[in-house]
Amino acid sequence: MNIKDLIIKIIRPNGKIDFLFSLPSDALILDVGCGNNSPYRVKKILPQSVYTGIDVGDYNQTEHNNSDRYIITSPEEFSSEISKFSEEFDAVISSHNLEHCDHRDETLEAMLGALKVGGKLFLSFPCEQSILFPKRGGTLNYFDDSTHKFIPPKFDSVLLTLEKFEFEVVYSNKNYKPTLLRLVGLILEPVSRLKNRNLLGTWEYYGFESIIIAKKTQKPKHLP
């Protein structure tokens, strides 16, 4: 076990790394919006997993992209490509992806449909309040990132969709503020403000992220 990943798991409970450690070693994983070297990071923790990544561009990937399947599609076809994976995966990861999607509802529903019964979803996105946060390098205000679409996803609407698709919410937090990182962010906030960029703990101090973890309990009754 990599010591850095272990530390992140401890200080960010219910974060993406902690979620990965909760999965079986041979899990079938779909990573939706898999940029920023996510294939390498996932396979480092779960080398025996079967990893599928999908995105609309080859964003910040290294030569160590060791996906088992790696799909680049267009923004227009993104949700329909995901919908092809009907009940295939043990886990779906969507880490800061929804806010970039042209068709959020369709993308979320396609992700839910890609999970097997008993499969788990990890979902994170900027909180609704982030439209009011200070502007800062590295994105603290939602509109700092020009690739963000519309306004932040609505937390309660996402929960309603999960309920509709027969998912049990295992963990949800509208403003994710793990204790240790929130304290670090508080201490470093004057420096972050002075430098006008995010530092360690800035997101956690403000509660920038919304996080939801959910489990598929059965196939939705309204679907054939």
Image: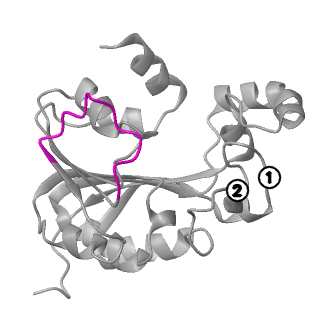
Q: Residues within 10 Å of mark 2 (few under 14, many from 20)?
A: some
Residue 165: within the magenta?
A: no
Scheme of image coloration: one colour
User: What range of the chain is rendered magenta?
Assistant: 57-69
Task: Let me know if residue 23 appears in the view.
Answer: yes
Image quadrant of residue 152?
bottom right
Q: Is residue 87 above or below residue 70?
A: below
Q: Residues within 10 Å of mark 1 (few under 14, many from 20)?
A: some
Evaluate if marks 2 and 1 touch, with contact meaning CB atoms under 8 Å apart.
yes
Image quadrant of residue 182?
top right
Query: In whole angstroms, how far apart are the C-alphas of marks 2 and 1?
Result: 6 Å
Give the mark nearest the N terminus, 2 or 1.
1
Q: Position of residue 114 (x, y in %)?
A: 18, 64
Q: Quadrant of the N terminus?
A: top left
Q: Main secondary structure of the magenta part?
A: loop
**Dot 1 amino acid type:** Lys
Q: Is residue 121 above or below residue 102?
A: above
